[in-house]
Image: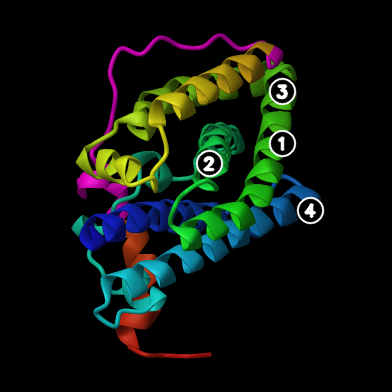
């Protein structure tokens, strides 16, 4: 089971790490100062979550790898994050839509994970949930402001939602690891999370005066290490300092 548990934790840690790395690209580029700080703080929350999860993953693996080893010295095919996390930030509407979809998933996922029989994961989930609640409230409010705002903001958000929606079914595509972890009382019921997520997405889209786009295709494969063309460039930037100066400490 330790191998399955390691992979399960790595997935959670990679989602937080890659999403945080992308969101950090907004630092100094936000639409105004308050939002610039809000985006940076959210990115810091995600990186902090990744540190807790990757540190625990290293303990479970038992091979002496630290959180830094797992973050900076794995190759592209070894990462297990959802594809939606690694997409370029795009414009503010694109980032807002992505964060809303991800924040809604994170909130309901970590709320369920609080009941995990693995006490460390349960504690991480409880600590994380407060941040998830704030993140969801923040991105939901921006969805409404942009969707029910100007003609341009609505058009941009409508386009972003249509582009991103095909990536969201990957959230709920359970595989053998999910099934084993749920049987062990560690993993969560993804069907329940999917129902809650869909209800929240529909509610916010209605409030934002947006129609939910139909799904003509879906994208996935990130949890199997099959990434988009963007992932290699992201890792090259994120890992460059540690790979150039291994063991560097501030």
Residue 28 occupies quadrant? bottom right
Q: Most prominent secondary structure in the magenta stretch?
A: loop
Q: Any mark on residue 106, and which? A: 2
Residue at figure coordinates x 65%, y 20% from the top left: 204
Q: Earlier in the sequence, mark 3 or mark 1?
A: 1
Indicate which label's residue lies in the foreground, 3 or 1. 1
Q: Earlier in the sequence, mark 2 or mark 1?
A: 2
- In space, the residues marked 4 and 3 are separated at their CA atoms by 20 Å
Q: Any mark on residue 150, and which? A: none
- In space, the residues marked 2 and 1 are separated at their CA atoms by 12 Å
From the viewer's perspective, is 204 left or right of 56?
right
- In space, the residues marked 4 and 2 are separated at their CA atoms by 26 Å
The local secondary structure at tag 2 comes to: helix
Instruction: Answer yes or no: is residue 116 visible.
Output: yes
The local secondary structure at tag 1 comes to: helix
- In space, the residues marked 3 and 1 are separated at their CA atoms by 11 Å
Instruction: Answer yes or no: is residue 227 visible.
Output: no
Residue at figure coordinates x 71%, y 36% from the top left: 137
From the viewer's perspective, is 156 left or right of 222?
right
In the rendered image, which residue does mark 3 sit on? 144
Write the start and end of the magenta stretch as one range: 207-231
Q: Earlier in the sequence, mark 4 or mark 2?
A: 4
Counting from the top left corner in percent of width and height, residue 138 is at 71, 39
Q: Any mark on residue 137, and which? A: 1
């Amino acid at each position: 089971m330790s191998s399955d548990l390691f992979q399960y934790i790595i997935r959670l840690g990679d989602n937080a790490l890659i999403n945080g790395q992308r969101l950090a690209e907004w630092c100094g580029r936000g639409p105004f100062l308050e939002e610039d700080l809000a985006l940076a703080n959210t990115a810091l929350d995600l990186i902090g979550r990744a540190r807790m999860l990757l540190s625990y993953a290293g303990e479970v693996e038992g091979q002496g790898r630290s959180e830094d080893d797992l973050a900076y010295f794995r190759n592209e095919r070894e990462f297990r994050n959802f594809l939606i996390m690694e997409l370029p930030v795009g414009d503010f509407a694109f980032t807002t839509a992505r964060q809303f979809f991800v924040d809604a998933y994170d909130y309901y996922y970590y709320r369920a994970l609080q009941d995990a029989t693995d006490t460390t994961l349960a504690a991480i989930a409880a600590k994380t949930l407060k941040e998830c609640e704030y993140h969801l409230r923040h991105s939901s409010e921006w969805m409404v402001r942009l969707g029910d705002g100007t003609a341009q903001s609505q058009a941009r958000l409508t386009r972003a939602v249509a582009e991103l929606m095909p990536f969201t079914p990957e959230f709920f595509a359970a595989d053998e690891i999910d099934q084993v972890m749920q049987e062990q009382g560690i993993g969560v019921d993804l069907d329940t999370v999917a129902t809650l997520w869909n209800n929240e997405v529909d509610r916010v889209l209605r409030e934002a005066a947006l129609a939910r786009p139909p799904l003509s295709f879906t994208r996935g494969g990130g949890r199997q290490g099959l990434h988009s063309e963007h992932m290699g460039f992201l890792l090259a930037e994120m890992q460059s300092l540690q790979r150039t100066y291994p063991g560097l400490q501030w």
